Amino acid sequence: MSKIRSRFRQSFVLIASTCGLAAGCFGGSSNSSSDVSDDTGGAVQDLSADLPTVLADLSRTDSQADDGSDVPLSVLPAGCDAIALSTAFPQSFEGTTVGGSVELGAECQTTDSAPERVHYWTAPSAGTYRFDTGGSSFDTVLSVYSGCDPSASALQCNDDATNSLTSAVTVSLDAGEGVLLVVDGFGQESGTYTLSISGREEDCSNSADDDLDGAYDCDDSDCAVRCTDREQWPEAWRQAEIEMLNLVNQNRRAGANCGGDEYGPTVDLELDTVISQASRGHSADMGERGYFEHDTPDGVTFDERMTAVGFHGASPWGENIAAGSSTAAGAMQGLMNSPGHCRNIMDPSYRVMGVGYAVVEGSEYRHYWTQNFAGSH
């Protein structure tokens, strides 16, 4: 059995998220959501009770981690009207937007009349942090602003994370840097939400648990791509990747009809060895951890993987994945027969690609293929 999936990132997405820097980020739809739970020792705050009462409690009481230690609340800047979250991570915060204000709105949707809740969080250390609303009961929109200035452009804004009606954004923060986190609804939607905060393993060789998730260095899934040893990649897999690149360029030279969209002959793609690190890491990771998705089980997106290996080429970026076929020709046939994958392959704005092929014995599909695309090296 073989499977294929496609994902692309438009040029307006500038940094690692489904939709970045607000401009051009539009609402979409999907049919599934993913739950995010705090099972790693982070503090969990509950707003299921009456909101004003809980806010009064939060204003005078620090939260407590599972080990009983105190975790300080973020200190609100003067005049900042927001819910102060504890500085802990990972953590989850539960609340409701019902009865919230309709003031700020979200830059990544054109019409917004939904109530919102505004939070303030301070990074306890420098690093990359992910904020998401997985497990919420409605179609959320999540915005992140620097400091307590919602009049400025959002650092990040996201409506729908991959395969979900909930939202996720990733930002890099300095130690002590504060951000506003605005949980909004798409259109007029509202309901109960879960706002989760998690970190990222920044250094894969420092024998430290940077993101406090209990996994160190290359044992942490955040390091799956960076710990992939390209020099140990089997020669047969390398040859299969070159064959895939050649087949992509054969199709680009010939032109194709992708679901009714005609693509004329276009330029060959050059192999980018940096992107290929991300492609190889994702193919191996899908087989080893038993999933077939563009996002890892931890929520890492394809563009975050590309950024993690040090790639900084021009937009647009994109990704195709396939599984089950033991040959490049078989995988390529399935991709070209799917309009979305075909469009990625034929897109004339792409100039480079990475390819990753891995065989994982004992996995569901055994053979895994990842194609990543970009506008330049």
Image (cartoon, rainbow, N blue to C red):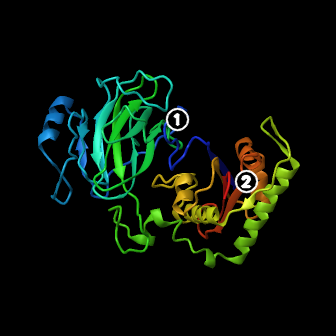
Give residue 222's position: percent from left, percent from top. Answer: 46, 62
Between 86 and 374, the residue placed more toward the observer is 374
Disc 2 marks which amino acid? Arg
Crowd band around label 1 with a 10 angstrom C-alpha radius: few (<14), some (14–19), many (20+): some
Where does the C terminus fall, quadrant-wise? bottom right
Which residue is rendered at x = 77% and y = 37% of the image? Answer: 259
Q: In the rendered image, which residue does mark 1 sit on?
A: 23
Q: Name the residue under label 2.
A: 351
For residue 98, side relative to residue 224 (left or right): left
For the point 61% across and 69% down, the residue is 360
How crowded is the residue under tag 2: few (<14 C-alpha within 10 Å), some, or many (20+)? Answer: many
For label 2, the SS is: loop
Type of residue at label 1? Ala
Vertically, is 94 above or below 66? Answer: above
Q: Position of residue 262 (x, y in %)?
A: 82, 38
Q: Quadrant of residue 199?
A: bottom left
On screen, residue 95 above or below 331: above
Say which residue appears at 52% left-offset and 41% top-offset. 19
Residue at x 38%, y 74% (from the top left corner): 206
Q: Which comes sooner in the sequence, label 2 or label 1?
A: 1
View extreme (left): residue:
60
Residue 238, position in %: x, y?
71, 72
What is the spatial separation of the Cα atoms under label 2 and label 1, in whole angstroms? 24 Å
